[in-house]
Image: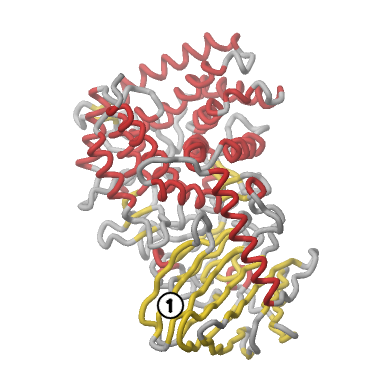
Amino acid sequence: MSSVPIASHALLSDCHSAALVTSDGSVDWMTCPRFDSPSLFGRLLDSSAGHWSLSPDGVLSVSRRYLERTLVLETTFTCSTGTVVLTDALAMGLGNRGHALGRGAPHLLIRKLTALSGSISISMEYAPRPEYGLLRPLLSPVDGGVTARGGAEWLVLSAPAPLTISSATATGRLELSAGDTYVFGLHRSTLEETPAHIWDQDALIARLGETVEAWRSWSALHQNYEGPWRELVHHSGRVLQGLTFQPSGAIVAAATTSLPEEAGGSRNWDYRFSWVRDASFTMEALWVAACPDEVSDFFAFMTTAAAGAVEPLQIMFGVGGEHDLSERTLPHLTGWRDSSPVRIGNGAWQQKQIDVYGELLDAALLLADKITEMDEDLRAFLVALADTAANRWRDPDQGIWEVRGEPRHFLYSKVMCWVALDRALKLADRLSATDHAAHWKAARDEIWQTVIDSGWNPAAGAFTQYFGGDTLDASTLMIPIVGFLPADDPRVLATIDAIATRLTDSRGLVYRYRAESGVDGVEGGEGTFLLCTFWLAQALAMAGRVTEAREVFVRAAAYANDVGLLAEEVDPATGELLGNFPQAFSHIGLVNAAWAITQAEQRSSSPG
């Protein structure tokens, strides 16, 4: 069982796959060559599932940061005998600059140790356990390091000192004095690829420098937002880029699977996939924190992956566009803090969620100027999405939160069908679909009236989760955000206030809904959702309540860890981060809320 706090981890990415490094210098999670590949190191989910640690003796304090404008991690250990810096990175391809970030990544993890003062002893332990810890590979010494073979993996560890091998684990001791630098590299390939190989010290140092420059060149081209929380917004943009699968443009919801929504609970899901529902929110955040090129790439991925099956439209895909994401459990893994089961795959891929039509067409509106450049098949696909929303909006579904209980008439799903038709009407000329406009308008107006009549609950004094229910739901904050009603509409203001006062914990963080209501068909509880808290800040800003919006934003952003990463949730009892990590949706919420507050402040200072 791993008991290391989720917040103690930092992300490494080569825009293909990810690794998580703990604050004490252990790589406890790494997948390769894709985010959704089986783990090579999985101690995050079980103590026997593999790790790679570099542990200085006599540590007194630890500080961490990402090198400026990168996702290259620097950890400084102040020890009783000196100070040493550990620099970690997943290497980028040679010559990667700007939009080419991640192209040709060699699947190489680099770990550099540099002694700043004194003399430091460091213990190294390398225990690869491919396929989620099922395999204990054969380790063999070679000149300059150690090879590991087992299953489909060929791993080559380049090491600056001799290592001892025992029980599928390599160990060693290093003695560093001020000025010394030692570099390790873990290179991975499969049996059918060009084999991984030993890298010499100079080559590893050079590739690490290339990786720093690659990230900085991307940041220089992409991050032009100026406003409050500039560094938070820019860093969130880099995190979103780090969760992007470069070959396809897909963005995963998180780098991990099965980090729980409640410690010791069973609400543990695999988030290493790309969801349609995230499309418009992600693209808006990329527009602010990155640039339109990434927006276009993500939209191209989503429309390509989704094409061919409009009714019903699948809600999520693998990073390569795969449709079958069948879910299974891994009973040999105990889970983080005994939170089981550990799941891979995600059964939600088979759910019906009618909100997805709105998310894709909302995303299309962001790229309105490029629609006329799209091929006829893609335009026909977008028209079909709108037609389907017009025809299916009356259907019950599983909703944005992917409940595993009975389908219901979720308000958010109806609102997003309205969004689908509203955006399609705005795009009708560009889609050469003006002959559909009358049908779309009639359906849009009928949805609007139905939501007003059936979604508002006078007894609750708010819009509620589903028609006829009294459960508050943070997704109703999207009503003003997507333009269904103005933010200063009395019903919207009442809903904002109801959520702020009755759907928050003692810290003022927002639950998505009360899990104990039983609506989602899953046992156990969950934490407050950072995304939902940022939605509250965004809605308050749009309503002109900027001071409150800033307070809510600062409250949520404070839960970023020491290197600026957010998980999905916060434990209401302890304030500890919960859920998969880092969570794209939380960073998306941060960016969009920051932008909304900036715009609101500009409006208030320039009323003309």
Q: Which quarter of the image is occupied by the C terminus?
A: top left
Residue closer to the observer: 404 or 85: 85
Asked if residue 286 lies left or right of residue 370, the reply is left
Q: In this view, does 305 lie above or below 46?
A: above
Q: Which quarter of the image is occupied by the N terminus?
A: bottom left
Crowd band around label 1 with a 10 angstrom C-alpha radius: few (<14), some (14–19), many (20+): many
Q: In this view, does 453 lie above or below 335?
A: above
Residue at 49 percent of width and 89 percent of height: 121
Q: Quadrant of residue 167?
A: bottom right
Q: In which quarter of the image is residue 473?
A: top left
Residue closer to the observer: 521 or 188: 188
Q: Read off the residue under disc 1.
A: 77
Q: Where does residue 430 sit, x and y in percent of width and height?
A: 61, 17
Q: Is residue 352 among the parts visible in the rendering?
A: no
Q: In which quarter of the image is residue 185?
A: bottom right
Asked if residue 365 lies left or right of residue 377, the reply is left
Residue at 68 percent of width and 78 percent of height: 158
Q: Where does residue 24 sit, x and y in percent of width and height?
A: 44, 75
Q: Is residue 154 above or below residue 469?
A: below
Disc 1 secondary structure class: strand
Q: Where does residue 169 sit, x and y in percent of width and height?
A: 61, 84
Q: Which colour scheme is used?
A: secondary structure
Asked if residue 229 lies left or right of residue 291, the reply is left
Residue closer to the observer: 317 or 164: 164
Q: Is residue 152 among the parts visible in the rendering?
A: yes
Residue closer to the observer: 178 or 432: 178
Identified by mark 1, the residue type is Phe
